[in-house]
């Protein structure tokens, strides 16, 4: 079911590609604007030329983790008859032609000038291409302003391939007409494609002025950064969303949630220049979002089920940036340690009565062991945390006092 007036997020991922930060950034902006304007958000899945259902479902599930809710999903594969009908109309109107060229012949193609009779007498397979436009193409970009493209820079381009499947640009242009799309957000590298789609609209006498926003691509020293890899590394969805909305943007505050951003987000505030991916900044934002987590929720994220463990985890935010790094710290506390060197103190600690306060527990161990306080703290620090480095046991103890038997096993 195609819904008129939808705000469209173009979801175009081939089977071998994970959702990356550029895709998610676009999805977030689409979501924010659709909620601001109270318009429906449609995800258009460009799978007309690919059988990519498994990857599509995986990426849809990823999108849902980030709070982006959509109203409907439209598959290009369901619109094939519309592409073929409109390609036939362009042929009838003499705005397109049948091309019989092989790959080797394309540079010297003369198929545009074949007569109707010559075309009818050909038995070999063909694709359908547009004729070169003889008009200027304009579009309004919410970030870059009004843009004009010289028609001389656009060559004959594909509408239908020899297998009768639509090209990406033709399918997308027709989908925008069917959906009555009001706005499209995409990467800056898609600018030529946007002009080609506008050209197709002109040929088909579709005159709705779609708004565009072409985002400068995120600059980073790595290849594309997949969302799955960030999640696997222990970054929270809320922190990733916060960072991507903040990136190259003017925002009233640095730390915020998606619902807050709906109130003030403005696509016109996005920078025209490429923002740089800054892992240190993402780490800082991730820390802040971990701090805001409910302690029981944080505990469950690192594989435990206690508010005390969640509070303990937050202590390690002084030296950890991600859920994974925190989990390593907590897992070490509960792991078996090679403690033969500190065996005597370990046995004393295991058999000690319950103490509500750390200072009382410490005094008991000093008294029973006959060791100096500095040595007791060093040995106890290792028995609890696995490290002989100075530990703030006074801060840690309140959250692990009920688990000492398990920790000192």
Image (cartoon, rainbow, N blue to C red):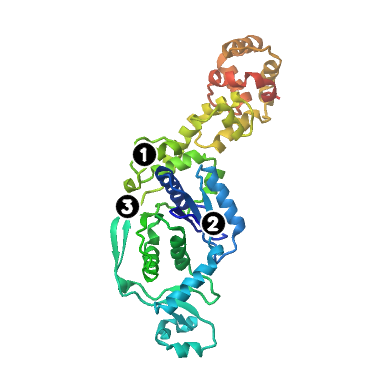
Q: Quadrant of the C terminus?
A: top right
Of 46 and 92, nearer the camera is 92
The vertical placement of 208 against 382, above or below, is below
Query: Is 60 above or below relative to 265?
Result: below
Pair 3/1: label in front:
1
Query: How far is mark 2 from mark 1, CA to CA?
Result: 32 Å
Q: Secondary structure at mark 1?
A: helix
Question: Between tags 2 and 1, which lies in front?
Answer: 2
Query: As displayed, is residue 194 above or below residue 84?
Result: above
Quarter of the image where the N terminus is located: bottom right
Q: In the picture, residue 347 is in which quadrant? A: top right
Dot 3, crowdedness within 10 Å: few (<14), some or many (≥20)? Answer: some
Picture coordinates of residue 4, whole percent (x, y): 45, 55
In depth, the one of 35 and 57 nearer the eye is 35
Identify the residue under disc 1: 264
Using a 10 Å C-alpha cutoff, classify the residue at mark 2 as few (fewer than 14 neighbours), some (14 to 19) or many (20 or more): few
At x 35%, y 55%, the residue is 211
Residue that numbered label 2 is attached to:
1
**Which residue is denoted by mark 3 in the rendering?**
143
Q: Position of residue 379 (x, y in %)?
A: 61, 21
């Amino acid at each position: 079911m195609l819904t008129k007036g939808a705000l469209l997020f173009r979801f175009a991922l081939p089977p071998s590609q994970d959702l990356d930060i550029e895709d998610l950034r676009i999805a977030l902006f689409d979501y924010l604007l659709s909620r601001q304007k109270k318009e429906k958000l449609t995800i258009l899945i460009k799978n007309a030329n690919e059988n990519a259902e498994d990857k599509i479902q995986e990426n849809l599930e990823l999108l849902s983790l980030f709070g982006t809710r959509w109203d409907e999903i439209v598959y290009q594969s369901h619109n094939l008859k519309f592409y073929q009908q409109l390609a036939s109309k362009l042929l009838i109107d003499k705005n397109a032609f049948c091309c019989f060229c092989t790959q080797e012949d394309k540079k010297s193609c003369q198929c545009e000038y074949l007569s109707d009779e010559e075309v009818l007498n050909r038995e070999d397979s063909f694709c359908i291409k547009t004729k070169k436009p003889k008009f200027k193409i304009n579009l309004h970009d919410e970030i870059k302003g009004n843009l004009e493209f010289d028609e001389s820079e656009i060559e004959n381009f594909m509408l239908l391939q020899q297998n009768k499947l639509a090209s990406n640009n033709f399918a997308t242009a027709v989908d925008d007409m069917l959906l009555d799309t009001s706005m499209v957000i995409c990467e800056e590298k898609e600018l030529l494609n946007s002009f080609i789609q506008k050209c197709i609209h002109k040929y088909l006498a579709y005159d709705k002025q779609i708004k565009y926003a072409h985002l400068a691509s995120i600059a980073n020293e790595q290849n594309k950064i997949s969302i799955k890899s960030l999640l696997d590394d222990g970054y929270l969805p809320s922190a990733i969303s916060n960072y991507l909305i903040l990136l190259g943007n003017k925002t009233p505050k640095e730390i915020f949630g998606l619902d807050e951003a709906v109130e003030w987000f403005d696509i016109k505030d996005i920078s025209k220049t490429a923002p740089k991916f800054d892992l240190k900044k993402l780490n800082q934002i991730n820390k802040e979002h971990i701090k805001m987590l409910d302690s029981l929720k944080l505990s469950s994220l690192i594989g435990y089920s206690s508010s005390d463990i969640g509070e303990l985890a937050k202590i390690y935010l002084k030296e950890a940036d991600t859920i994974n790094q925190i989990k390593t710290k907590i897992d070490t506390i509960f792991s078996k340690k090679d403690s033969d060197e500190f065996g005597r103190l370990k046995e004393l600690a295991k058999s000690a009565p319950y103490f509500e306060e750390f200072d009382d527990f410490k005094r008991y161990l000093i008294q029973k062991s006959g060791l100096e306080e500095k040595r007791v703290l060093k040995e106890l620090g290792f028995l609890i945390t696995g490290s002989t480095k100075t530990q703030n046991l006074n801060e840690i103890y309140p959250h692990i006092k009920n688990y000492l038997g398990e920790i000192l096993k």
